[in-house]
Structure formats: structure tokens, C-alpha cells
Amino acid sequence: MEQNSNPIMNTTTITCNKDYGKGTCGGEITFWDRPSDWKAFPKCAKHSAEAQTEFERIDRLYGVTSDVPPAGFDPTACGEEW
Ligand SMILES: [Zn+2]
């Protein structure tokens, strides 16, 4: 087994955050950093890939990691800033 420098990984059993005991997980558990806010979620390889695909879909639609507001963004609508 590969050594991980994260001390949490060495002392605790990390389970995938999509592991509902239904055996739907697969592969090694790693932390997935959500690109929109860099929150880390423990995920198995399978759910990590799904999360990445889903994030890319959302990012394409809404551009959450973009510095440029989406076409429909109107700061006068409710006083929000991008
Ligand atoms: Zn999983």
C-alpha cells in the first residue's frame, strides 16, 4: 500500500462520502478537491471520477471557476457581485 503524507489517512479509516453501504464504491479512496472552493471530500476512485465529470458539467453551464460572469449575470438584479 502506498504511503500517504496526510496524517489523517494513516490514523483513520477514510470512507468515500458516497459510500452508503450499498457496495457502489470502487477503487482507492483519495481526497477530491472541489475546484470551486477547494473543499476536500474523501472519495473512492469511481465516485471521484463521477464528481469530476459532474463538476465539469456544472462548470461548463455556470462557469463557477471563471472570473468572467456568465452572460445572464446582472449585478443590478439583487446587488450581488461576481
Ligand atoms: Zn464511492
Image (tube, helix red, strand yellow):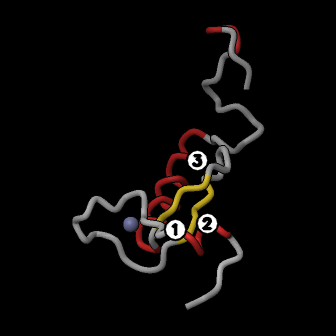
Going 57% across and 71% down the picture, which residue do you hit? 11
- With 43 as the anchor, is 82 left or right in this view? right
Depth order, front residue of 78/73: 78
- Above or below 73: residue 55: below
Q: In the structure shown, which secondary structural element does the residue marked by tag 2 occupy? A: helix
* Residue labelled with disc 3: 59
Q: Percent position (x, y) of residue 42? A: 51, 62
- With 23 as the anchor, is 35 left or right in this view? right
Location of the C terminus (image quadrant): top right
**Considering only order in the chain, which callout, 2 or 3, is on the residue closer to the N terminus?**
2
Looking at the rendered structure, the kind of residue marked 2 is Ile
- Is the CB atom of the residue marked by disc 3 within 8 angstroms of ligand 1's nearest atom? no
Going 60% across and 25% down the picture, which residue do you hit? 72
The nearer-to-camera label among 3 and 2 is: 2
Is residue 74 something one can see in this rendering? Answer: yes
- Above or below 72: residue 4: below
- Measure how far apart labels 3 and 2 are at the Cα level: 30 Å
Is residue 49 something one can see in this rendering? Answer: no
Asked if disc 1 and disc 2 are in contact, CB closer than 8 Å, the reply is yes
Q: Percent position (x, y) of residue 37? A: 66, 44
Q: Which numbered disc covers residue 39? A: none
* Residue labelled with disc 2: 8
Q: Which numbered disc covers residue 12? A: 1
